[in-house]
């Protein structure tokens, strides 16, 4: 029974291209598994397991890995080795270039004690929500006006001081 579960997990991991992509990107960059491990603050054995498709990086590392190689997380997970190496080559400056809208709606609540709670929502999800809202009666003009925020230079959307001393800021990042 346990072998069956282990084989199913390995099949799922192998269905993604992340291990092969990390290996190809690392080799293209000319660094060792140990150097990559040091950069990501993980063991070289962890990097080896990723590249051998016996495990996957923790989800919290995906953006760090993608940023390090100059690719998107989506590319890291889905693209074939040759394609992702070409994309990384195009993005040598470290900035991920994509046709996707990279803007976020950032909601930041600053409590009286100075502690901040930050939520980032990709603008494409906001647009999706607006489209769904339009299907259920949200005035089309309103949703179109909100959807055009991403094209404007507007960054501050809302700044509110609440009666209990919290500051709420909603910005376009």
Image (spheres, grey):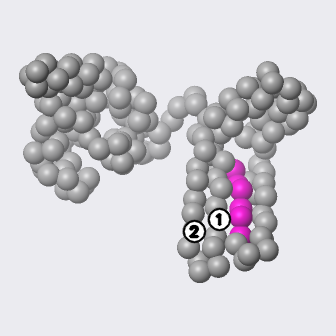
Q: Position of residue 104 (x, y in %)?
A: 62, 45
Relative vertical location of residue 91 with respect to residue 113 in this rendering, above or below? above
Name the disc covering residue 54, or none: none
Q: Position of residue 15 (x, y in %)?
A: 27, 19
> Contact, CB < 8 Å: mark 2 with mark 1?
yes
Answer yes or no: is residue 66 visible.
Answer: yes
Q: Which residues are magenta?
A: 167-172
Residue at mark 1: 109
Within-10-Å neighbours for mark 1: few <14, some 14–19, many 20+: many
Q: Position of residue 5 (x, y in %)?
A: 17, 23
Q: Residue furthest front?
A: 1
Residue at 68% across, 29% down: 128
Q: Position of residue 79 (x, y in %)?
A: 36, 22
Q: Name which of mark 2 and mark 1 comes first in the sequence.
A: 1
Relative vertical location of residue 116 with respect to residue 91 in this rendering, above or below? below
Residue at mark 2: 116
Relative vertical location of residue 88 with respect to residue 106 in this rendering, above or below? above
Relative vertical location of residue 20 with respect to residue 123 in this rendering, above or below? above
Could you say whether the residue bearing mark 1 is in a helix, strand or loop? strand
Could you say whether the residue bearing mark 2 is in a helix, strand or loop? strand
Residue at 14% across, 25% down: 6
Answer yes or no: is residue 21 visible.
Answer: no
Residue at 64% across, 53% down: 106
Whole-angstrom CA distance, mark 2 to mark 1, is: 6 Å
Does the magenta-highlighted stretch encompass residue 171?
Answer: yes
Quadrant in the rendering for residue 113: bottom right
Residue at 81% across, 39% down: 146
Q: Residue furthest bottom?
A: 113
Provide the major secondary structure of the magenta segment: strand
Quadrant in the rendering for residue 75: top left
């Amino acid at each position: 029974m346990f072998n069956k579960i282990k084989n199913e997990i390995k099949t799922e991991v192998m269905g993604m291209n992340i291990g092969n992509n990390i290996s190809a990107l690392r080799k293209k960059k000319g660094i060792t598994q140990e150097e990559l491990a040091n950069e990501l603050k993980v063991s070289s054995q962890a990097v080896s397991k990723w590249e051998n498709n016996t495990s996957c990086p923790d989800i919290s590392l995906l953006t760090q890995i993608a940023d390090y190689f100059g690719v998107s997380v989506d590319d890291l997970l889905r693209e074939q080795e040759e394609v992702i190496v070409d994309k990384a080559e195009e993005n040598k400056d470290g900035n991920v270039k994509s046709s996707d809208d990279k803007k976020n709606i950032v909601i930041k609540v600053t409590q009286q004690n100075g502690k901040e709670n930050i939520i980032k929502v990709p603008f494409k999800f906001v647009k999706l929500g607006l489209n769904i809202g339009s299907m259920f009666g949200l005035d089309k003009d309103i949703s179109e006006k909100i959807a055009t925020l991403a094209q404007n230079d507007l960054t501050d959307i809302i700044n509110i001081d609440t009666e209990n001393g919290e500051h709420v800021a909603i910005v376009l990042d």
